[in-house]
Amino acid sequence: MKKTLKVLSLLLIFSFLSGLALLAQEEKVLKLTLEDCIIRTLKNNLGVSIQELNPEISAASLSKAKEKFYPTLQFSYTQRRNNTPSFSGLESIESTITKYNDLYGQISQAIPFGGTLNISLDTYKNFTTQNFQTWNPRYYSTLRFDFTQPLLQNFGYNMSRKEIIIARNNLAASQAQLEKSLMDTIYSAEQAYWNLVYAIEDLKVKQQSLKLAQELLEKNIRSVEVGTLAPLDVLSARSEVATREADIIQAEAAVKNAEDQLKTLMNMSQEEEKQYTAIIPVDTPKFEQKEMSLEEAISIALANRPDLKSLQINLKTQEFNLSVAKNQLLPALNLTASYWSPGLSGDRLVYLNNNPLTGIIVDVIPGPRSNSLKDALNFKYQNWSVGLTLNIPLSNMISKASYTQARLNLEQAQLSLKQQEQQAMLEIKTALRNVQANLKRVQAYRAARELQEQKLAAEEEKLKVGQSTNYTVLMYQRDLANARSAELKAIIDYNISLANLEKALGLSLKNRNMKLVDFLDSN
């Protein structure tokens, strides 16, 4: 009794471990819906990752271009000491020592219409051992406003912002290119997903066909044994079984190839590939009839296709470049205006009889550096100037060449847009035609499959009563398998053609409620 219980316990443990092993085996299968496949592909695909960097690069260029209108601060400090030999005894006995320090600050601001405004404050101290000085050390400060404005060449709001406008257009173009890359990737993921579905289902069809051939072979063997069938019929059945086994080997390889294609698109890591033994698509191909007129399709495509958006943006850029080149043909006429206020302070030297030539200092009236700054900031001494500068080149061959180049670039952009619109028309017509053709193919192959099922059933009944042959039944089985594969392929092609039409219309992201900003923010 104890021995029996021990055996039962071992069997229970073995069954439990076997169940765990089967469960672990099941966990190694990666089940994917179509949307899961698309999301994983968009998230991990290397091509998408490369394209996602382009808007970031363009955004950085735009930020750099905007820095032109940020105010800039400039500070400088200079300390200098000069010791020069004296050329005259009146200057000094042997040499003249001069000590100088200067503190300078400036704020510069670009004006939206092409000009610049500078505000600067400069203050310096000068001390010398030279004789006959009336201020020593001497402090001098200047508050200054300088304004420069082009009036012809480089004048205008757009001219001053040309780097920003071009950078903004480049950003929009890179975003359109990223959107196109995303839609191409979505289509590639759908295509790979449905191809894997077809490979798996086609393998099932061939396995079912093999099963039918094996059943007929077993039946023939029994019939030969009882003497009701010739041995030749067994050979035909064996040959057909071998042929269908070869078809299964090819179908299994097609499944692995389709899996590898999908894994590459999803950029599946080697660790994840080792974790899962197979990919099982969850979604099945649908057959939903969709109708759309050519006019409606063209209207949708013109409003949504990112390749057309990119070329339209490039056209705007070339139009702007032409206007800039045209502006550069004008002479340079610049308005300059300045306003400055100086201030002076220092230690004032009082000589005997107010005559510096005596060299006798009787008093020193101190003056701090701050007094010179106060005079400058309080506009004690006001000065201004206004001027016009006209620069007319004797030859503007370079400017004319740039204008010609910009005009040709514009013409090229216009032709490129027109060519792409023609290509878009062709893609839309082809996509619509493929949808309609694949729809009819599904209907035709479905009818053919149903007829093959009826023919096989009828031939099997005839075989039972001796009015048919095993060879005929085997051929009808093969015809049915081919009809099922053809119907399945037509349904898959129909779903892929719908995805291609969606891409041709530029709706791959919109139909999934995906926005480009979601991918940009993810970075």
Image (cartoon, rainbow, N blue to C red):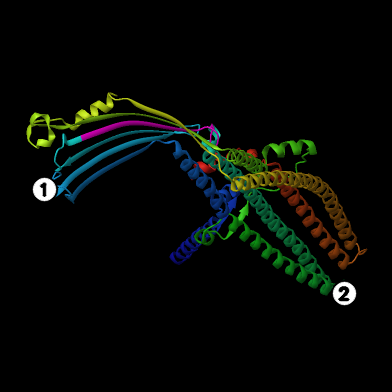
- The crowd level at tag 2 (other Cα within 10 Å; few <14, some 14-19, many 20+) is few
Percent coordinates x, y for residue 325 in the rendering: 60, 42
Taking the spot 15% from the left edge, 30% from the top edge, the residue there is 367
Taking the spot 76% from the left edge, 54% from the top edge, the residue there is 489
Taking the spot 28% from the left edge, 26% from the top edge, the residue there is 377
Q: Which residue is mark 2?
A: 230
User: What's the residue type where badge 2 is placed?
Assistant: Ala
Q: Which residue is mark 1?
A: 93
The N terminus lies in quadrant? bottom left
Along the horizontal axis of the image, is 147 left or right of 135?
right
Which residue is at the front of the view, 451 or 61?
Answer: 61
Along the horizontal axis of the image, is 1 left or right of 43?
left
Q: Main secondary structure of the magenta part?
A: strand
Magenta region, residue range: 139-156
- The crowd level at tag 1 (other Cα within 10 Å; few <14, some 14-19, many 20+) is some
Percent coordinates x, y for residue 458 in the rendering: 89, 56
